[in-house]
Amino acid sequence: MRYPKDQKADTKRHILEVAARSFRAKGPDHVSVGEVMSEAGLTHGGFYAHFKSKDALVAESVAAMFSDARSRTSPLDDALAGAGSDVRDALLRYCRSYLSSAHRDRPERGCPLPSLSADVARKGGAAADALTRGLGAMSDRMARVLDRLGEDDAINKATAIVAQMVGAITLARTLGQTPESDTLLNACYDDLARRYGA
């Protein structure tokens, strides 16, 4: 039985959402295609109507994760476009949100960089390319913000900010839900707020 094209696209989108959550939470090497399809409420056999391989699923999932993460950067995008709050305020709100216990405690909903960098680097291929593109887009957006704030050497500073935030979340997750983890996140935010706040 053939299904309408929009139903196939909706099903693929649903599979990607489920895979993205699972891959961020457990890592792609610890999640099987069968698990993704079962969680999506579909049969394993239906997988190949949407993806050529698990590697293709991982790569498309990484791209989808960055697309989803764009919704969290919309205050930055709005500020850059001249809508809403000022750029400095938007930057600090974004950093606070990124360096939060909520982000630490919900890897399945967060930025893919702290969750997937090591796993995807080992895999290489299209997934690594998608992660590299996502990192580049994140750094470029941050550089545009810093440029608007009049910062010299905006791209290098932006790259450092992204690395600091990703590293902080990675280490905070390693420490778990502890006072030390909270201190680490707050220290990183305070450092960024000192450097780029009003």
Image: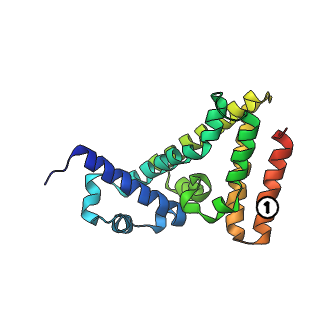
Tell me the SS state at disc 1: helix
Query: Does 16 sit above or below residue 171?
Result: above
At x 59%, y 58%, the residue is 118
Q: Position of residue 100 (x, y in %)?
A: 70, 58
Q: In which image quadrant can residue 41 be found?
A: bottom left
In this rendered view, identify the residue nearer to me: 9 or 75: 75
Q: Is residue 195 left or right of residue 110?
A: right
Q: In which image quadrant can residue 175 be found?
A: bottom right
Q: Quadrant of the N terminus?
A: bottom left
- Residue 140 visible in the current orientation: no
Mark 1 sits on what residue?
A: 184
At x 72%, y 34%, the residue is 87
Q: Quadrant of the C terminus?
A: top right
At x 72%, y 46%, the residue is 93
Q: Residue furthest left?
A: 1
At x 79%, y 53%, the residue is 188
In this rendered view, identify the residue nearer to me: 101 or 38: 101
- Residue 35 visible in the current orientation: yes
